Amino acid sequence: MGPGPGWVVAVAYGLSSPLSAGVMWLEIVLASVLGFVIYWFVSRDKAETLPLEDGWWGPGARPPGREDESIRPFKVETSDQEIDDLHRRIEKVRLTPPLEDSRFHYGFNTSYLKKILSYWRNEFDWRKQVEVLNRYPHFKTKIEGLDIHFVHVKPPELPSGRAAKPLLMAHGWPGSFYEFYGIIPLLTDPKNHGLSDEHVFEVICPSIPGYGFSEASSKKGLDTVATARIFYKLMLRLGFQEFYVQGGDWGSAICTNMGQLAPSHVKGIHLNMGFILRNFYTLTLILGRRFGRLFGYTERDMELMYPFKEKFFYKMMRESGYLHIQATKPDTVGCALNDSPVGLAAYILEKFTTWTNSEFRDLEDGGLERKFSLDDLLTNIMIYWTTGTITSSQRYYKENLGKNIMAEKHQRMKVQVPTGFAAFPDELLHVPEKWMKFKYPKLISYSYMPRGGHFAAFEEPELLARDIIKFVGLVERQ
């Protein structure tokens, strides 16, 4: 009986005998060449689009008649009652002491959490942060039965003879539209922030349905494709026939789906996270350490992906527990998080430590304030807390991952829209250029970013802005 897959893995880790290794390496190389041939035939570019269907996510049956398409101004507000209730709940917190020398290896360290709670209760000024949120214009409009919230920022001034380029920026979990507050002025007013004004943007930042101030679906099934369709309708309603899109985390999937739904309207897609599931190259992860150049990996790719066990396997095991809960039974944990601001803060802020840099788990404070201010972090928490949307935001995992995702048409489809990708070194999983080109054959810009992690716009707004501007310049010159 011939050697099985387990033997190949053993060879990859140098566990075979020297006598048989040479023969097996030859077999692996030949198999890889054969794989490339099969891959070429199977994955030839096909110009497909997703069907632009319709939906109704509001309560009950869809009412007769045309949906109200008016766009209404919106302001974030608060009250003494809301703030007093928050303070009472923080004061009644009951915490479990951390284990000695555990730092952030068991999750959010409660010794450090006490410091955050003291600041939140005694120094954090939610009224002031509400004013910060209202610094940019907010709006709501009804789409497919849901009140969709968005921030819409126009340039304060334009160079003579220039038009602003519309750019939709889509957030993910556990973020919000507030992640983009640092990058918005760099894109809408680049010259006054030390950047080139060759390209000036009009930025639209919608909240995903069920996140923040966007109404949650009353029905099952609202996934990234449905969200992409809603956001596409939003852009048309705002009068944009052509526009750019940008996103990370769920925003990456939403922007990708927008390109698949309406490629003639989406001028370009810029991403800082890649979801590449159906891909020959993902099968090369184990062998890539020895055959990286054969698979098209650069030296930088190798640094970011290996050793495989630490950079991929153990890292995914450490950081994906939440995903399994939210993709299966989000409402259960949602009950606890929606009732306790302290629990909500610990659950969300933990992601801003190790998703920013996995080595932050070795620090007593999780490195939380190395890249973010407590005011910014707590403002993001307050958007979830005051709107009561943690449960509906977690359901998004169930709607997208609680099914046979590999059978979804959009996972099989390529994206025939010019694409740019910013590879931040501390992202949860590095996606090499070769992987991106499989899904996005019109990839025209791929950048190895010098620093930064998962929350790129929040953490490194200038780096991300520069890469977006570079990408748009390439598209415009085509």
Image (cartoon, rainbow, N blue to C red):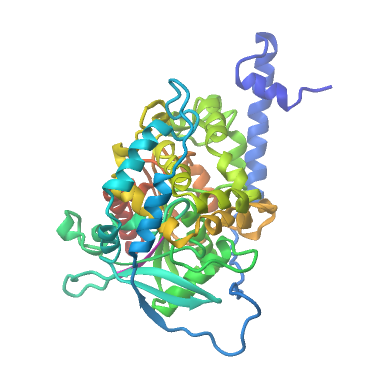
Location of residue 439 in the rendering, given as x and y in whole percent from the top left corner: 54, 52
**Quadrant of res 190:** bottom left
Q: Nearer the viewer, residue 237 or 33?
A: 237
Q: Quadrant of the C terminus?
A: bottom left
**Is there any visible trace of residue 184 in the rendered image?**
no
Task: Say left or right for 194 vs 295.
Answer: left
Residue drawn at point x = 62 percent, y = 37 percent: 283
Magenta segment range? Answer: 165-170
Residue drawn at point x = 30 percent, y = 40 percent: 371
Q: Nearer the viewer, residue 321 or 250?
A: 321
Location of residue 188 in the rendering, given as x and y in whole percent from the top left corner: 25, 64
Q: Main secondary structure of the magenta part?
A: strand
Residue 360 lies, with reference to residue 86, above or below; the image says: above
Q: Nearer the viewer, residue 56 or 350?
A: 350
Q: Does residue 167 belong to the magenta stretch?
A: yes
Location of residue 470 in the rendering, given as x and y in whole percent from the top left corner: 30, 54
Q: Does residue 95 belong to the magenta stretch?
A: no
**Is there any visible trace of residue 311 in the rendered image?**
yes
**Quadrant of res 179:** bottom left
**Quadrant of res 265:** bottom left
Q: Residue furthest right?
A: 1
Residue drawn at point x = 66 percent, y = 15 percent: 21
Q: Quadrant of the N terminus?
A: top right
Q: Residue furthest bottom?
A: 65
Location of residue 353 in the rendering, given as x and y in whole percent from the top left corner: 40, 37
Residue 184 lies, with reference to residue 296, above or below; the image says: below
Residue 469 lies, with reference to residue 242, above or below; the image says: above
Q: Nearer the viewer, residue 222 or 364?
A: 364
